[in-house]
Image (cartoon, rainbow, N blue to C red):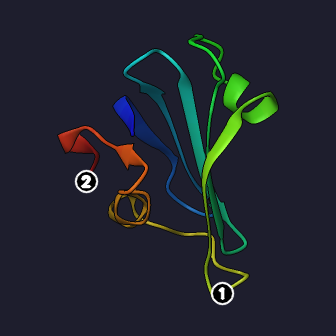
Amino acid sequence: MIVVSKIEKTCRMCPSQWEGVTEDGRQLYARYRYGHLYVNISKTPTEDTIAPISDGITVFTYDSDDEWDGVMSSEEVATLTSDVITYPEDFV
């Protein structure tokens, strides 16, 4: 289980996206665009916020029925990824 210690929604419109840090210091990036949600984390602890995008590991993906959708709430992300990721209480 990936434990996130800090996360914030960095884009409230389309595409919805989040940036955060795991308990062990890896960067997290999540994005929902064109009906596709993916969550990447950096391979190692880092302060480089681009690491999960440029050289990260995809830990979760989801495709909705609406290929044009790009808006998702933090609550939806937490629910969809609950088997893989634990978030801080203030995330939802």
**Residue sitting at the far top:** 46
**Residue sitting at the far left:** 89
User: What residue type is disc 2 on?
Assistant: Val
Q: Is residue 51 visible?
A: yes
Indicate the quadrant where residue 64 lies.
Answer: bottom right
Foreground: 37 or 1? Answer: 1
Quadrant of the drawing holding the N terminus: top left
Mark 2 → mark 1, Cα distance in angstroms:
23 Å
Q: Residue at the spot x=34%, y=64% of the render?
A: 79
SS type, badge 1 = loop
Foreground: 65 or 33? Answer: 65
At label 2, counting other C-alpha atoms closer than 10 Å, the crowd grade (few under 14, some 14-19, many 20 or more) is few
SS type, badge 2 = loop
Q: Residue at the spot x=63%, y=22% of the render?
A: 49
Disc 2 target residue: 92
Q: Position of residue 34 (x, y in %)?
A: 73, 72
